Image: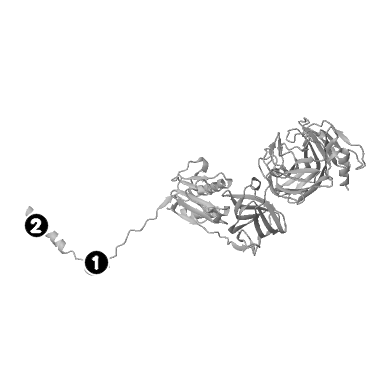
């Protein structure tokens, strides 16, 4: 029985093999072999990722905005960390925003990221989101959520039940949506314009800002630049160049006018340094509304800088020193004909708040944020010399007359109570020695946009050596009639002292600090209404650097007006009180 079963099974196997048809030659030659499809490798941008931002406030704001969008889309809140507070690792799971210390792993050309252009790049497990503007970051965020989650509109985000992912080594470098117009300055410098609402052939209109990108960087080894422009508005500017091989941007301000030649020293000029390669100039409106601007030309120069901090002018009788590193305030006044070898400088230059200098008082209300000076919260206070911490105001420009008797200076003053904060304002002085005195013409313009308050304005702030101990002025009502003068001895410190204010009763508004010998130095401000005077730490010193000093400020009550020029003049002379009075009398008419 077993033999029969085995034979039967063998028969079936032979039959099955024999019945299998052999493939024909045609079938063998026409059969197609299909390869397995290539699988796209995608990287999950998961909850393990950390958002990396720099110390720049804008970088933090950008990271926070992304975090909110990510949370709305996924329900997950990603951690945020400052780059310097997080250990670097080439393989870290990070989303990096803008310029951070992670650039060594991926280089971004920020010069190309104009308008709404951006870079979205995945390198390893690190995602870079970089742009040059808020509009650029918004465009980058839109691209990320579209590519990773299929979300078409980030303003209409709804929670998606999946993890965002991007293809391995994903990189998207967008072009700006705004067309950059090509143009040239009068001297043939080629540039492209970003941000213009309308215009061509150098003449453009805009509402917020306009950027001039130069096709070839302008300048080599310069310490001064100039812009020839025309505009109908007050404007804020930024110029970007290379300083010590690093990009550096400095701020400037422009007034309305036709073919105005704005000249400025570079911030590093007084240090004896030079700059290179201006890449761009940005012009921004200070007030809202349509703004017209023409960049007629741009140029650079390498000017010879003084080897000392103080620049001197003289007529043989007076030697006047202007401290360029302290905004061009007067730090030195010598009467070469006084016959007293024991005194050289009549002024006190102990710190940036002394000198003879411009100083103005403005708002103490929002949006301005007052700072503390002594025991008081201090208002907006542009000071020519610098701030309370000894930081120096920035010299913008200066010129010494060919005859050596006059000098003009322009500075961007610091805010006295703040720490190294430049004010959006310019001060100018023209110091001229002539006719037995020094005439000082002053000009001030504030670009802050603040609404200021009425305040006593120092016209000017005037500090002398302690040796000139007595304060002399005319306190009567019959101006220039040679009536008796008032002499104040042993005046106390002026701050917080109501007795330090002397109201003027006539147009004879001069005053003087006088030594026991009867010799002194006087100041005359024709528009003065009040004299504020006093002594600090009196010790009778003749040393200009001594902490002890005598002070006077001819005052007016005046409310600064933003974007309006304020001008006044005053006179300085020396001698006996009779000589001082007679000299000032000749300028009173």
Please give the label number shown on residue 7.
2
When asked about the image quadrant of residue 225, the answer is bottom right
- Coordinates of residue 15 in the picture (x, y in percent): 14, 62
Does residue 287 show up? Answer: no
| Residue position marked by numbered label 1 in the rendering | 28
Disc 2/disc 1 C-alpha distance (Å): 36 Å
- Classify mark 1: helix, strand or loop: helix
The residue positioned 24% from the left and 68% from the top of the image is: 27
Taking depth in this image into account, of 153 and 311 the one nearest to the observer is 311
Neighbour tally class for label 2: few under 14, some 14-19, many 20 plus, Cα within 10 Å: few
- Coordinates of residue 436 in the picture (x, y in percent): 84, 45
- Classify mark 2: helix, strand or loop: helix
Taking depth in this image into account, of 293 and 575 the one nearest to the observer is 575
Does residue 350 show up? Answer: yes
Q: Is residue 465 left or right of residue 307?
A: right
- Coordinates of residue 442 in the picture (x, y in percent): 77, 48
**Residue 243 vertical placement versus 291 (above, below):** above
Q: Is residue 314 left or right of residue 208?
A: right
């Amino acid at each position: 029985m077993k033999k029969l079963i085995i034979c039967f099974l063998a028969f079936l196997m032979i039959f099955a093999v024999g019945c299998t048809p052999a493939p024909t030659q045609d079938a063998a030659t026409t059969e197609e072999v299909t390869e397995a499809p290539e699988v796209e490798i995608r990287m999950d941008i998961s909850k393990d990722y950390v958002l990396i931002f720099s110390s720049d406030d804008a970088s933090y704001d950008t990271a926070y905005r992304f975090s909110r969008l990510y949370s709305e889309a996924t329900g997950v809140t990603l951690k945020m960390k400052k780059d310097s507070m997080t250990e670097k690792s080439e393989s870290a799971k990070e989303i990096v925003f803008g310029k951070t210390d992670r650039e060594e792993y991926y280089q971004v050309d920020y010069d190309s990221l104009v308008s709404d252009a951006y870079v979205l790049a995945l390198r390893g497990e690190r995602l870079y989101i970089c742009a040059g503007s808020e509009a650029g970051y918004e465009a980058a965020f839109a691209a990320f959520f579209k590519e990773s989650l299929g979300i078409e509109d980030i303003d209409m985000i709804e929670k998606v039940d999946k993890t965002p992912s991007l293809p391995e080594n994903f990189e998207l470098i967008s072009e700006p949506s705004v067309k950059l117009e090509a143009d040239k300055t009068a001297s043939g410098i080629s540039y492209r314009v970003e941000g213009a609402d309308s215009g061509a052939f150098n003449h453009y209109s805009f509402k917020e800002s306009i950027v001039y990108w130069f096709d070839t960087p302008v300048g080599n080894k310069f310490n001064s630049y100039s812009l020839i422009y025309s505009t109908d508005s007050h404007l804020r500017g930024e110029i970007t160049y290379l300083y010590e091989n690093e990009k550096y941007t400095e701020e400037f301000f422009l007034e309305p006018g036709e073919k105005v030649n704005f000249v400025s020293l570079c911030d590093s000029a007084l240090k004896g340094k030079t700059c290179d390669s201006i890449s761009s100039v940005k012009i921004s409106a200070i007030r809202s509304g349509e703004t017209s601007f023409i960049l007629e030309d741009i140029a650079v120069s390498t000017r010879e800088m003084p080897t000392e901090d103080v620049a001197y002018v003289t007529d043989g009788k007076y030697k006047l020193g202007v401290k360029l590193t302290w905004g061009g305030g007067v730090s030195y006044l010598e009467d070469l004909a006084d016959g007293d070898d024991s005194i050289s400088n009549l002024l006190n230059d102990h710190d940036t708040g002394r000198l003879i200098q411009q100083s103005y008082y403005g708002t103490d209300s929002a949006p301005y944020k007052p700072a503390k000076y002594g025991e008081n919260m201090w208002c907006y206070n542009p000071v020519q010399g610098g701030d309370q911490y000894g930081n120096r105001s920035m010299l913008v420009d200066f010129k010494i007359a060919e005859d050596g008797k006059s000098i003009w200076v322009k500075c961007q003053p610091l805010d006295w109570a703040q720490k190294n904060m430049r004010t959006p304002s310019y001060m100018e002085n023209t110091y001229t020695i002539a006719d037995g005195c020094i005439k000082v013409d002053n000009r001030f313009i504030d670009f802050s946009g603040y609404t200021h308050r009425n305040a006593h304005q120092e016209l000017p702030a005037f500090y002398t050596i302690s040796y000139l101990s007595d304060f002399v002025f005319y306190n009567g009502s019959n101006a220039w009639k040679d009536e008796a003068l008032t002499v104040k001895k042993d005046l106390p410190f002026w701050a917080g002292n109501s007795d330090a204010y002397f109201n003027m009763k006539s147009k004879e508004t001069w005053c003087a600090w006088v030594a026991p010998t009867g010799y002194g130095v006087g100041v005359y401000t024709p528009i003065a209404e009040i004299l504020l005077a006093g002594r600090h730490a009196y010790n009778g010193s003749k040393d200009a650097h001594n902490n002890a000093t005598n002070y006077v400020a001819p005052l007016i009550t005046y409310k600064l007006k933003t974007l309006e020029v304020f001008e006044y003049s005053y006179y300085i002379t020396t001698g006996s009180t009779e000589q001082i009075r007679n000299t000032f009398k000749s300028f009173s008419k």
